[in-house]
Image (tube, rainbow, N blue to C red):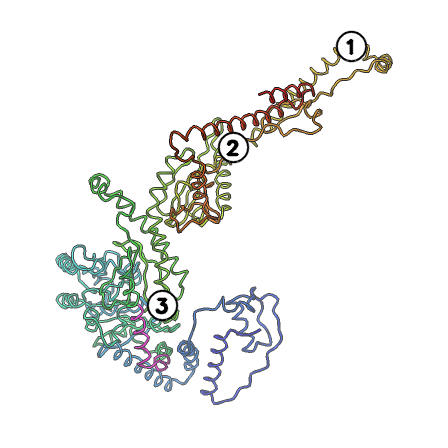
């Protein structure tokens, strides 16, 4: 078997690094032809040991499974480039370097840590800063909180929580911050949740995702007056949802006024490495600390996050855990040290610049699209683009809406938002599925609702997003917008048609992205609820199957797996050429057909039983009549045979047939006369949609017919041919002198047609009469 290229390359780099460090050639043993019968089940440790190729093969099988020969690319993880190999190699080298002697290890780790910190501070314009490297991106903020507690509470090292109880600390976090950040800090610090203060965002002026500075000032004043200690403020340079930046300049002034620590985090901090930086993000260089997530920005796997901070007392930093006296702890920076050297300054700036260009390209294209509303902080440069589909009052009359605003304003607004959230959720999932390299996802915002987010700084380096991917994303969006607008406009028409149709029930499900939800109502008197529920489920399931067999462009389903309504038919997205009335009529007619067939099967047993009983009674009566006709003598065994020999008695055999369609008994005399079994009563026609009969050849169901000469030809237009035939059959307008002749001719032809039809009908009716009667009928028809 072939080893995964990523694992093979990593093993190759690891072997070469160990050879260079040890300066000792080591021969690799040949690969053993060993097969494991139970690879997924833990087993005993091999006594003789395994070679590296076998171990890597085992790891590959555990990662991708055993069926990896032909479909290896389908199970491949994210594309790890050469810079990713450097980061992965750093973890292996860190483990190897840790076995060096203490003095050499101290010198090496000091050099790695100082180099990496110097490069990052210069790259992101953070002068005279120190760095803390951590795996969890929240761990840096946690250590900063401990540093501030040690700084503001001088006796904290000795008295511990007693000093905090005397003067409760307060940490301020924006309401747009990451979910659960405040609770995580309180749990790790051992503080009550009352120490965490959530600051609302702007409601009147400015961005609705920025922290309200005036309200924050009042909150700090209230806490100071109540004897609390304002400790730290967590601001955003790119909120997790919309990517907006707080007013960091004013917040820094407020923190200096109350002697608070200002910590900044967010994706927009990556733009500090560019030549042009917006003033709002540039203010982050004056903050007390910031957290950088270089792994997602540069596409580096398994590299630590970095928290840059400024503090003058090394002892407090050591007490807070920001620095360590153990050299092994400093080796966390080794993967990042290798990757930064491999990329270089220009390579790092180019990756961040490329991500910014991608977002700008998408933003420019979105401005030219109708029904797309964007939510960006800066139209010129916004690393995060958030957009949504929005069509104001698309399915309602604005005049009537304004007239009824005083009574139904809140329900309409809530329903509209719910519907738009559902549609945008569907739009985001479709775009992510059609263009996976774009990295778009769905985000829930407090004011805007459900939106689609494009954040290339977090995804482009990992997914390899290019300009053509953005263009493809825009093309897919252009194709989906007409579908969304058409579905939104036809939802109300579909609801009205369903409510007007007997037998159908409209089910309102605002969380379904589609035309709507309908249920065929089945009412049966005398049945319990459980039996009626089963019958309802059976009918709607069969209805769904028949609708899917129509080969239309619509999608019919049972709805979502969880949270959907039972025994319903869910209709997906539609286009503008949908004929809603035909769709509803077809659903109703198909449901009635299924219900009639179901009732026929239910009554079949009872009908057959009653028919057999009635047939037995009629046959018994016929036997009695036969006895009376033949006489008693013919029933005596010997006498009857002699009598029948001298005077034969001819009697037609009498029997009964049971017509399942009509549910009635019929005599078999006609069968013996015609020597063929009759078909009986013609079954009722299957109820179908009247509109479906007018469908053009090749036209799919539920599509409107275009009434234009370009859309119809002589071979494909049924309605056009019908109009031509009606025009040809219509008599021309004649003057009064010439009008009598054609009229008389038409009357004569009509009389001939009536005579022929009457003759044919008479022959059919009199088919069982004698030849003499037939001759008389023919003579009468000839005389007529």
Secondary structure of the magenta portion, mostly? helix
In this figure, which residue is indicated by the disc labeled 2?
Answer: 596
Residue at (53, 33) in percent of width and height: 685
Residue 668 percent location from the top left of the image: 68, 23
Judging from the image, what secondary structure is the residue with disc 3 in?
A: helix
C-alpha distance separating marks 3 and 1: 104 Å
State which quarter of the image contains the C terminus: top right
Residue at (34, 62) in percent of width and height: 474
Above-or-below relation of 130 to 709? below
Q: Does the magenta-highlighted stretch encompass residue 356?
A: yes
210 displayed left or right of 69: left
Q: Which mark is residue 153?
A: none
Tell us which disc is closer to us: 2 or 1.
1
C-alpha distance separating marks 3 and 2: 57 Å
Mark 2 packing: few (<14 Cα in 10 Å), some, or many (20+)? few
Ranked by sequence position, the earlier of labels 2 and 1 is 2
Q: Does the magenta-highlighted stretch encompass residue 144?
A: no
State which region is magenta: 338-358
Between 661 and 746, the one lying in front of the other is 746
574 displayed left or right of 401: right
Q: Which mark is residue 459?
A: 3
Q: Which mark is residue 631?
A: 1
State which quarter of the image contains the N terminus: bottom right
Ranked by sequence position, the earlier of labels 3 and 2 is 3
255 displayed left or right of 53: left
Residue 606 visible, this orientation? no
């Amino acid at each position: 078997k072939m080893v995964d290229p990523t694992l093979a390359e990593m093993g190759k780099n690891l072997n070469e690094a160990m050879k260079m460090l040890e300066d000792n050639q080591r021969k690799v043993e040949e690969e053993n032809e060993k097969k494991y019968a139970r690879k997924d089940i833990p087993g005993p440790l091999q006594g003789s040991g395994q070679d590296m190729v076998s171990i890597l093969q085992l790891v590959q099988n555990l990662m991708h499974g055993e069926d990896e020969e032909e479909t290896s690319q389908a199970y491949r993880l994210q594309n790890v480039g050469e810079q990713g190999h450097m980061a992965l190699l750093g973890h292996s080298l860190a483990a190897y370097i840790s076995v060096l002697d203490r003095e050499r290890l101290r010198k090496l780790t000091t050099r790695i840590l100082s180099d990496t910190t110097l490069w990052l501070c210069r790259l992101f314009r953070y002068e005279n800063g120190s760095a803390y490297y951590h795996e969890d991106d929240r761990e840096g903020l946690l250590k900063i909180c401990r540093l501030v507690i040690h700084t503001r509470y001088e006796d904290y090292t000795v008295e511990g929580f007693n000093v905090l109880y005397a003067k409760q600390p307060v940490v301020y976090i924006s309401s747009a911050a990451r979910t659960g950040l405040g609770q995580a800090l309180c749990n790790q610090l051992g503080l009550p949740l009352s120490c965490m203060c959530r600051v609302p965002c702007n409601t009147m002026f400015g961005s609705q995702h920025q922290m309200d500075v005036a309200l924050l000032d009042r909150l700090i004043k209230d806490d100071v007056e109540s004897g609390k200690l304002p400790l730290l403020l967590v601001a955003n340079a790119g909120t997790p949802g919309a990517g907006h930046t707080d007013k960091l300049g004013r917040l820094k002034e407020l923190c200096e006024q109350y002697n608070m620590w200002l910590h900044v985090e967010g994706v927009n901090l990556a733009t500090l490495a560019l030549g042009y930086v917006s003033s709002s993000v540039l203010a982050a260089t004056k903050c007390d600390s910031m957290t950088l997530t270089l792994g997602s920005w540069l596409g580096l796997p398994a590299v630590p996050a970095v928290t840059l901070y400024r503090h003058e007392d090394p002892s407090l930093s050591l007490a807070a855990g920001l620095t360590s006296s153990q050299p092994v702890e400093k080796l966390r920076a080794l993967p990042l040290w290798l990757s930064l050297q491999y990329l270089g300054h220009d390579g790092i700036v180019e990756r961040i610049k490329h991500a910014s260009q991608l977002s700008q390209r998408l933003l420019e294209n979105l401005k030219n699209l109708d029904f797309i509303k964007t939510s960006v902080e800066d139209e010129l440069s916004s690393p995060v683009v958030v957009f949504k589909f929005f069509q104001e009052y698309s399915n309602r009359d604005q005049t009537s809406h304004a007239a009824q605003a005083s009574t139904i304003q809140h329900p309409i607004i809530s329903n509209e938002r719910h519907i738009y959230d559902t549609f945008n959720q569907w739009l985001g999932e479709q775009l992510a599925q059609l263009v996976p390299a774009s990295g778009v996802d769905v985000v829930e915002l407090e004011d805007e609702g459900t939106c689609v987010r494009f954040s290339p700084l977090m995804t482009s380096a990992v997914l390899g997003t290019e300009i053509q991917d953005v263009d493809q994303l825009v093309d897919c969006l252009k194709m989906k917008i007409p579908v969304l607008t058409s579905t939104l406009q036809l939802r109300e028409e579909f609801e009205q048609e369903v409510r007007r149709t007997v037998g159908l029930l409209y089910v309102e499900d605002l969380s379904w992205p589609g035309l709507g939800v309908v249920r065929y109502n089945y009412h049966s008197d005398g049945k319990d609820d459980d039996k009626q529920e089963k019958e309802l489920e059976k009918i709607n399931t069969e209805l769904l199957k028949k609708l899917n067999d129509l080969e239309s462009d619509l999608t019919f389903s049972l709805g979502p797996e969880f949270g959907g309504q039972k025994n319903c038919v869910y209709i997906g997205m539609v286009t503008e050429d949908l004929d809603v009335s035909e769709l509803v009529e077809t659903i109703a007619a198909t449901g009635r057909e299924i219900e009639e067939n179901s009732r026929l099967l239910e009554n079949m047993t009872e009908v057959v039983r009653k028919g057999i009983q009635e047939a037995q009674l009629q046959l018994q009566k016929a036997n009695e009549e036969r006895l009376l006709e033949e006489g008693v003598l013919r029933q005596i065994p010997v006498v009857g045979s002699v009598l029948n020999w001298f005077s034969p008695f001819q009697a037609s055999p009498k029997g009964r047939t049971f017509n399942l369609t009509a549910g009635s008994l019929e005599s078999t005399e006609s069968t013996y006369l015609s020597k063929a079994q009759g078909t009986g009563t013609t079954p009722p026609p299957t109820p179908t949609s009247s509109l479906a009969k007018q469908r053009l050849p090749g036209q799919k169901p539920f599509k409107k017919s275009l009434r234009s000469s370009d859309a119809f030809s002589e071979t494909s237009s049924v309605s056009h041919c019908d109009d031509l035939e009606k025009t040809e059959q219509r008599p021309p307008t004649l003057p009064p002198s010439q009008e009598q002749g054609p009229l008389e001719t038409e009357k004569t032809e009509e009389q001939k047609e009536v005579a022929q039809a009457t003759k044919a009908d008479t022959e059919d009716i009199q088919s069982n009469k004698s030849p003499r009667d037939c001759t008389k009928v023919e003579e009468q028809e000839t005389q007529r």
